[in-house]
Image (tube, rainbow, N blue to C red):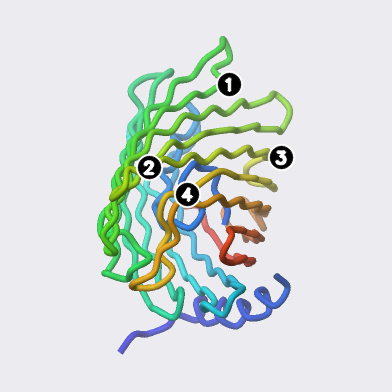
């Protein structure tokens, strides 16, 4: 029998209230896709990243197609040149339960270059990938190395019979004051049908680590395929999503996170809240 920890039970109580009022990681992935987001390497001279994060999300969907409930455990383990990250997510979407497992490794080549590889797989639920892999290369620019450019490729194999192949470009500028500006584009080809789509995003982060970090993100564009049932898919449509997240440190090691988001496509609207806790070791 599955045992539920007191923390998960507490989040389970908070989610219905949070959903009644209504995740965010800046990335160019399609808005409704599950996938592990690789951790970025720590700045030189700072302690190695080692942390655990537990979060729960509730999403209300229009159109009577079933609300979403997700619980995700994410762990990060830093080594001198590597940052390893694992993710385990239990999902309930469109009335179907599913489990996703993802792993990633971010490797620092030198002061200017680092790259990441992420893989993940679902348990057969139609809305999770049968298999996905993403690889990204990052380059720091300017004398202060405060402009980071990226180029990535991805492959997504869905249980419902379609595949995605994508190329993404992105950039992040770190100001001396506590601001980070980010932007990116993801160009995708879906098969069958060779459906072309493109998603863009912009994001703005304010704050300092170990204190508060607030991030606003807006993404828009087109999507190729999106499964909404075992035998039903949306094909070649426009969508947009806005989100706002807040990470607050209660002390030097432990903090809480809260996020809200709203996603719109021609068939339904989705609004949700994420709550969670994290601890740095």
Query: First in sequence: mark 3 or mark 4?
Result: 3
| Alpha carbon separation for disc pair 3 and 2 | 25 Å
Q: Which mark identifies residue 206?
A: 3
The location of residue 48, given as percent across then percent down, is 43, 39
Residue beneath disc 1: 146
Secondary structure state at the residue bearing disc 3: strand
What residue is rendered at 38% in x and 33% in y? 167
Whether the residues at callouts 3 and 4 have beta carbons within 8 Å, the answer is no
| Alpha carbon separation for disc pair 3 and 1 | 15 Å
Residue beneath disc 4: 223
Residue beneath disc 2: 78
Q: Is residue 103 left or right of residue 148?
A: left
Whether the residues at callouts 3 and 1 have beta carbons within 8 Å, the answer is no
What residue is rendered at 46% in x and 75% in y? 94
Secondary structure state at the residue bearing disc 1: loop
Depth check, front residue: 275 or 135 = 135
What residue is rendered at 60% in x and 65% in y? 274
């Amino acid at each position: 029998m599955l045992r539920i920890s007191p923390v998960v039970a507490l989040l389970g109580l908070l989610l219905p209230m949070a959903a009644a009022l209504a995740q965010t990681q800046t990335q160019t992935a399609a808005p409704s896709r599950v996938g592990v987001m690789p951790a970025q390497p720590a700045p030189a001279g700072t302690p190695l990243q080692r942390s655990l994060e537990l979060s729960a999300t509730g999403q209300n969907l229009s159109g009577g197609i079933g609300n979403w409930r997700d619980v995700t455990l994410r762990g990060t383990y830093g080594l001198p040149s590597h940052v390893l990250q694992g993710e385990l997510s239990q999902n309930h979407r469109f009335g179907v339960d599913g489990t996703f497992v993802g792993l990633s490794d971010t490797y620092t080549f030198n002061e200017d270059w680092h790259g990441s590889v992420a893989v993940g797989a679902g348990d057969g639920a139609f809305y999770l990938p049968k298999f996905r892999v993403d690889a990204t290369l990052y380059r720091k620019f300017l004398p202060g190395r405060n402009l980071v450019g990226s180029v990535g490729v991805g492959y997504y194999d869905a249980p419902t019979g379609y595949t995605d192949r994508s190329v993404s470009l992105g950039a992040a500028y770190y100001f001396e004051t506590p601001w980070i500006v980010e932007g990116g584009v993801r160009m995708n080809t879906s098969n069958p049908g060779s459906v072309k789509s493109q998603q863009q995003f912009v994001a703005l982060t304010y704050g300092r680590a170990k204190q508060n970090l607030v991030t606003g993100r807006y993404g828009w564009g087109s999507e190729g395929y999106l499964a909404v049932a075992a035998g039903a898919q949306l094909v070649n449509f426009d969508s947009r999503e806005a989100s706002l997240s807040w990470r607050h440190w209660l002390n030097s090691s432990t903090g809480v996170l809260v996020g809200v988001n709203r996603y719109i496509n021609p068939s339904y609207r989705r609004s949700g809240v994420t709550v969670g806790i994290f601890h740095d070791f």
